[in-house]
Amino acid sequence: MKSNNEVFTKLLALGSTLAVLGATGQEGLAQSDEDAGQLLPVMIISEAPQTESRSVTLLSGDTITLGGIQEVRDIQTALPNFTVFDANNTRMPKFSVRGLRENGFGVGQSAVGIYVDGIPYTDMMSRGFSLYDVDHIEFLRGPQGTLFGASAAPGGIINVRTRQPGAEWGGSAGLGYGDYGTQEYRLNASGPLTEQIGVSISGLYNDRDGFVTNLPTGQEIDGRESVAGRLQFVLTPSEPWSIRLTASSERYDDGFTPTYSPLSDAGPFKVSRDVPGYVNTDVATYALSADFGGEHFTLNSVTAFRNWEQDLQQDFDFTAIPQPVAEMGFIPVIGVSQPDVEQFSQEIRLGSVDANESYQWTLGAYYADREMDNVSGSLYPAGLFHPQFGLIPGPVPDYTNSTLSDEDTALYWQSSYTIESGLTLTGGLRYQNSERSINRSNSSNSVNSSDDWNDVLPKLGASYSLSDTDTLYASVAKGFQSGGFNFYGGSPESAQYDSAESWNYELGWSSSWNDGRVHTRVAAFYSDFENYQVYRLNPMNPTEAYMVNAEEATSYGIELEAEAQASETITLSAAVGLVNAEFDRYTDNVLRGVLGPMAAGYEFGGNDINFVPEYTANLAAHIQLPWNLSMQWEVQGIGNYWLDEANTAEQDAYALINGRISYNRDNWELFAYWRNLTNEGYSNNALDLRYTDFSDPAAPRPAGMILHIPGWPRTFGVGLSASF
């Protein structure tokens, strides 16, 4: 692990390189030629489409490609105070944004909402998706419940738009190969079938051997294979109408979920397991979207159905010992999870017609019905010790069967008015009702319960145009995450958790200089949370997790984004975020009930919120070279963050260096790329297992029982792509 000083040294070194490159382009910065053109494709575009606060970052689809941004985890390379912590081999991304962090087990309500072509990906389980044939990605910071129906999440909205059929036929194809047996193929084509019907078809296939070697067998056990496809029909029966039919499917076949136990494994990528494990995931999405552009209003309707199911088995004794050892009290155990999520959603949005009018408005309604059936728990393949009968031959299952039913209904409104002086005032209101029910049973108890949570969520904002290029903005908005029920097999008293509310404040300044060659955004934020939702591993069974509420928490910080076209051949970008996030009051009453009131280790008030890096720093340079060559360099710095609520295990600051070089000619490109060039070692996620030994409840086990999920090692690859 690297110290803060070492990381800042790396950042300073790259910053010096960028400064030298920038110096070569000062003549370009000083130019005032109105025909300077657009910025070259880079990782970040700060000048996003107009919004009420401009607290938006837009990622161009040109950066979302082979050797660039390839997965959801790669989005963090361009966003300040935004980090992705993986689970299940990146198939279930969990976000940490401005002091809000999500969990790795799929319980609870998301802190960040996701839309793909207007289709909401709402629950924590099923929102993983593949990035291919993407036109652009927007990240809107802060609560967006007055603009989007699916989420009042305080962290913001990731809005993904794929490429749509055009008036002429076209497409692209690409292939890539890399170390660890990596191979990937992409294809898309779109165009008109008739004057009223357009079609788009796109697909992705990739395959990779594992990074992790299982020492007893010598095999790489964390290989993965992905197949994804999307078919879209766009119908324009008359001028104001556009109707889109979408069907997509994804299949992920993964092996071992990389987990490293410091107490029993040789290293992050050298483990010992008798059961290699697997994670198989199937996703299907169907949607009908209709857009109407009338003379007095616009109408958008999205009806969607999504089905997501997964079959997971992982070695949860973290050893290669296949049989029980009575002398040690050791029992081999496999963690099992088999969730099946079905969701229907309907959203209707009305809005103003002309974006240039002084008065803008949006009015919407949203409904979603979601059901998750799940079997989870432990499987003892070689048997289980019984205090009276001795060893019971295996396999012995200890499963919890549960059905969770969720219904969400929301009405939302937002409008803004621009005064001639350049002042724009924004107001919005959202009403949300969330109904939750559970039917859960296992060998020790059962739970059959329901409840509902509702809230009224206001939003106020103002922006003032100091000039055509400078805007000050301020906003205050209330965020909401519904309460719900845990599907793990704990006591009935711990089955329910409460809704979380937050007040989120932001003050910022966005600007562009030198005839649009330089764009910047500076913002300060503060968030006050009540009943902050935190997940914990079940101390009675670490194969399951549960959600509890931290009574109070706060976060505050600053962000800076900048992008400059230094010359006709060099574009530079930077994004820096600093954040301080703390639990002000937090008692884990579930853990307190297990350890006993006289024990210690369940009070976390005053601790830093784990998985919230102290800073993020991203620097990038896109350089156009002679002979049709271009190069992209970027460095991502991540500050220290804690791996557990007790703040006993810490991930030191680290930096990742990525790059890409390409040769372009006519309509094809030959490229090479490298990720994590210095082969930096770091923990991209962790599980707190310190409370699973009750021999001394007052003293949880040492930090070595923090189970680490390592980040990916250094990788290289080459590829070829062409458009037609």
Image: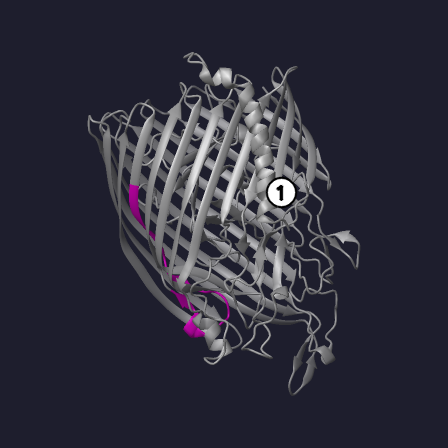
The structure residue drawn at horizontal position 33% and vertical position 22%, both measured from the top left corner, is 239
The structure residue drawn at horizontal position 42% and vertical position 13%, both measured from the top left corner, is 32
Image vertical order of residue 644 relative to residue 155, above or below: below
Question: Which residue occupies the foreground of this view, 371 or 620?
Answer: 620
Q: Amino acid at mark 1?
A: Ser
Q: Left or right: where does residue 378 sit relative to residue 301?
A: right
Q: Give how far across and how far down residue 3 sits, in percent.
A: 60, 49
Residue position for label 1: 226
Direction left: furthest residue: 420
First to last magenta residue range: 475-497
Q: Left or right: where does residue 419 sit relative to residue 230?
A: left
Q: Give how far across and how far down residue 355 sits, in percent.
A: 29, 27
Residue 176: name its quadrant. top right
Q: Residues within 10 Å of mark 1 (few under 14, many from 20)?
A: some
Image vertical order of residue 533 relative to residue 409, above or below: below
Q: Give how far across and how far down residue 294 sits, in percent.
A: 26, 27
Q: Give how far across and how far down residue 69 sits, in percent.
A: 56, 35
Question: Which residue occupies the foreground of this view, 51 or 648?
Answer: 648
